[in-house]
Image (cartoon, helix red, strand yellow):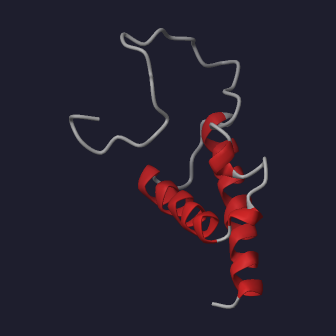
Amino acid sequence: MDAKTLRARYEKLKSEIHSHNYRYHVLDSPIISDVEYDQLLNEVKRIETEHSGWITPDSPTQRAGSKPADRFEKIRHPAPILSLANAFGADD
């Protein structure tokens, strides 16, 4: 894929992820699975690894979700959440 096409794909992915973040965190109405979301985000990460000059503060890799809707109840986790990385096994 040439650089121009890849850049367009990258920008489209960022826009899609922002939309999915809003639907998930604010509207509480996701339209894709967590696995599908992770695939999109991993593609963005791969592109940013190859083209670090393209990374901007609004990239989904530079942010942690969206502001949750006010209707969500605040909870206290039994143990601190020390990482925003995905957990795929019992040790995670």
Residue located 65% across and 55% down the image: 17
The outermost residue toward the left is: 90
4 or 72: nearer the viewer: 4
* Residue 70 locus on image (x, y percent): 70, 18
Residue located 45% across and 40% down the image: 85
Eyeballing the image, is 83 above or below 21? above
76 or 51: nearer the viewer: 51
Give the quarter of the image for residue 55: bottom right
- The quarter of the rendered structure image containing the N terminus is bottom right
Residue located 63% across and 35% down the image: 25
Give the quarter of the image for residue 92: top left
* Residue 37 locus on image (x, y percent): 52, 55
* Residue 78 locus on image (x, y percent): 36, 10
Residue located 44% across and 22% down the image: 81
* Residue 13 locus on image (x, y percent): 67, 65
The outermost residue toward the bottom is: 2
Is 42 on the left-hand or right-hand side of 91? right
